[in-house]
C-alpha cells in the first residue's frame, strides 16, 4: 500500500473491478460499538500479497473509522521470524493451519472468539477447518481461504502436462526451474517426490533422501523466488519454464498477462493448505473481529476470489451469485472440490517432526553448503 511504509512488495497488480453490485456502500456496515472509535488503534495485519488490496482497505477504513496497516510477508518461515523479532506487533496473523500449534506455544495467538464472526456461516460445508485450526481442543483461528501448491509450467514450451514432481529434476529443464523461499512448504514437496511414507514425519533415511534430492535440485533452479509477484515476474521474463507453484494466484496473474501458464497435480500428491486467520492477544478488540467478519462476507470473498484466483471459502453457488463467471471459477479449485480423484491427491500440511532441522537443511541449500 503506497500510503503505508509498512507495506512492502516488489510490485503491485491492478485491482479488478467487479461491478456496481459490490460497491463500497454495500460492503461494510459501519462500526458503531464505541463513541470513541476515532481513537481506535490501527489494526496491524501480518499478511500476504493479494490478501488485502489497497482499494478494499480504503473502503473499509472510511466505513469504520479505523486504519489498517498490512505488513507483507512472503513465507511461513518469515511469519515466525517477524513475530520473534518483535519488530512487528500485529493484531491479526495469516498463517497456514499447521502452524497453529507453534504460534500458540509461542504465545503469539489467542483463542478465537467465533461468536464475533457470524459470517463463518459462508464457509463451504465440505471444508474441514475446525480440527486443523484447533490446538488441544481450543479453536485458534478461522480459514480465509484454502488451496493447492501444484506443479506450474509454461504450456507453450511444455506441451504435455508433467505428471510427476520428477520433472523438476529433469536435466532438460536445467536452469529453468523455480521454487520459492520457504522450508516449511518446500521440504514436504521433496519428501513426496522421494516417496516418504509421511512427508511430515520423516525417518533418518528419509531425511537423507530429501537432503540428497534438494542438493541435486540446486543446479536445476534458476531462481528462488520471494512472493507471488516475484514468481510471476520470473515466468513472464522467460527465465523459468516450470516449478513448484507458490500459489495458483501466480498462474492466474500470468494468464492475465497473456501467457499460457498452467499447472498440474503430480501423481505423488500435491501439498495443500488451509490459510488460518489468527488473532493475537493484542488483537482481542471488537473492531478487529468486525474487520475479520467483513472479510468472511460473500462480497469480500467474491472480490478476493475474482482478483486473485484463490479458492476463498465460498461454495460454487454462492460465488456465482456474487458475480463470478464460469471462467473465473475454473481458475480456482472449487469446482473440483467434490471430485474424489482431486480430493485424494491433496496432502494437507501438518506440523512437522522437527521444524528447526528442516529450516537448517533449507538454509544450507540456499547457502550452497548442503
Image (cartoon, grey):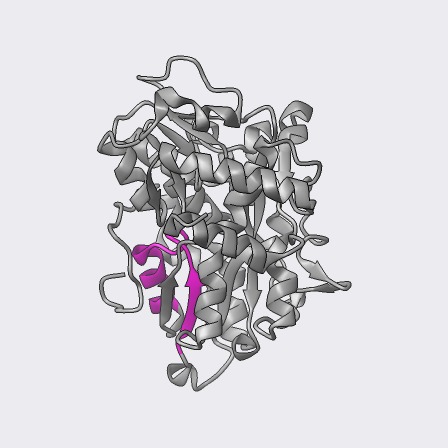
Residue at the far front: name it: 369
Q: Is residue 195 visible?
A: yes
Across and down, in percent, residue 192 comes to: 60, 34
Q: Is residue 60 left or right of residue 201?
A: left
Which residue is most to the top? 159
71, 298: nearer the viewer: 71
Range covered by the magenta-colored residues = 42-63
* Residue shown at 65% from the left, 54% from the top: 351
- 198 sits left or right of 179 in the view: right
Task: Answer with the quarter of the image where residue 273 lies.
Answer: top right
365 falls in the magenta region: no
| Residue 70 against residue 85 in the figure, above or below | above
* Residue 118 in which image quadrant: bottom right
Instruction: Between residue 29 and residue 3, name the one nearer to us.
Output: 3
Q: Where does the image place residue 261, in percent across and percent down from the top left?
A: 35, 26
- Quadrant of image for the N terminus: bottom left
Q: Is residue 54 rendered magenta in the image?
A: yes
Q: Quadrant of residue 137?
A: bottom right
Residue ID at (50%, 25%): 166
In percent of width and height, residue 324 lies at 44, 35
Q: Nearer the viewer, residue 322 or 212?
A: 212
Q: Residue at x 40, y 40 (%)?
A: 179
Q: Is residue 314 visible?
A: no
Q: Position of residue 117 (x, y in %)?
A: 60, 63
Amino acid at each position: 500500500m503506497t500510503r503505508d511504509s509498512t507495506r512492502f512488495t516488489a510490485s503491485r497488480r491492478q485491482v479488478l473491478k467487479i461491478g456496481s453490485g459490490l460497491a463500497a456502500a454495500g460492503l461494510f456496515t459501519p462500526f458503531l460499538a464505541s463513541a470513541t472509535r476515532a481513537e481506535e488503534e490501527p489494526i496491524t495485519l501480518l499478511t500476504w500479497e493479494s490478501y488485502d488490496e489497497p482499494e478494499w482497505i480504503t473502503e473499509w477504513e472510511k466505513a469504520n473509522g479505523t486504519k489498517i496497516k498490512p505488513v507483507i510477508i512472503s513465507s511461513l518461515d518469515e511469519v515466525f521470524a517477524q513475530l520473534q523479532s518483535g519488530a512487528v506487533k500485529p493484531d491479526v496473523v495469516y498463517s497456514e493451519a499447521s502452524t497453529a500449534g507453534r504460534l500458540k506455544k509461542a504465545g503469539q495467538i489467542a483463542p478465537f472468539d467465533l461468536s464475533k464472526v457470524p459470517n463463518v456461516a459462508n464457509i463451504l460445508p465440505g471444508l474441514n477447518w475446525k480440527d486443523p485450526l484447533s490446538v488441544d481442543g481450543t479453536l485458534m483461528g478461522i480459514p480465509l481461504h484454502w488451496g493447492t501448491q501444484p506443479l506450474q509450467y509454461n504450456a507453450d514450451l511444455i506441451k504435455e502436462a508433467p505428471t510427476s514432481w520428477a520433472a523438476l529434476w529433469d536435466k532438460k529443464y536445467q536452469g529453468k526451474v523455480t521454487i520459492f523461499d520457504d522450508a516449511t512448504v518446500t521440504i514436504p514437496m521433496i519428501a513426496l517426490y522421494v516417496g516418504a511414507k509421511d512427508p511430515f514425519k520423516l525417518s533418518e533415511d528419509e531425511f537423507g533422501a530429501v537432503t540428497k534430492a534438494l542438493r541435486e535440485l540446486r543446479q536445476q533452479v534458476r531462481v528462488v523466488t520471494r512472493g507471488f509477484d516475484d514468481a510471476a515476474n520470473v515466468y513472464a521474463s522467460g527465465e523459468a519454464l516450470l516449478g513448484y507453484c507458490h500459489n495458483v494466484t501466480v498462474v492466474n496473474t500470468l494468464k492475465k498477462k497473456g501467457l499460457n501458464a498452467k499447472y498440474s497435480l503430480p501423481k505423488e500428491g500435491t501439498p495443500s493448505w488451509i490459510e488460518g486467520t489468527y488473532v493475537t492477544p493484542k488483537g482481542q478488540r471488537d473492531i478487529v473481529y468486525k474487520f475479520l467478519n467483513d472479510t468472511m462476507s460473500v462480497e469480500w470473498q467474491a472480490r478476493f476470489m475474482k482478483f486473485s484466483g484463490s479458492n476463498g471459502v465460498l461454495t460454487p453457488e454462492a460465488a456465482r451469485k456474487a458475480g463470478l463467471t464460469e471462467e473465473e471459477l475454473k481458475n480456482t479449485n472449487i469446482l473440483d472440490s467434490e471430485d474424489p480423484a482431486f480430493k485424494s491427491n491433496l496432502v494437507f500440511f501438518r506440523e512437522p517432526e522437527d521444524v528447526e532441522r528442516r529450516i537448517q537443511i533449507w538454509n544450507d541449500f540456499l547457502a550452497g553448503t548442503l
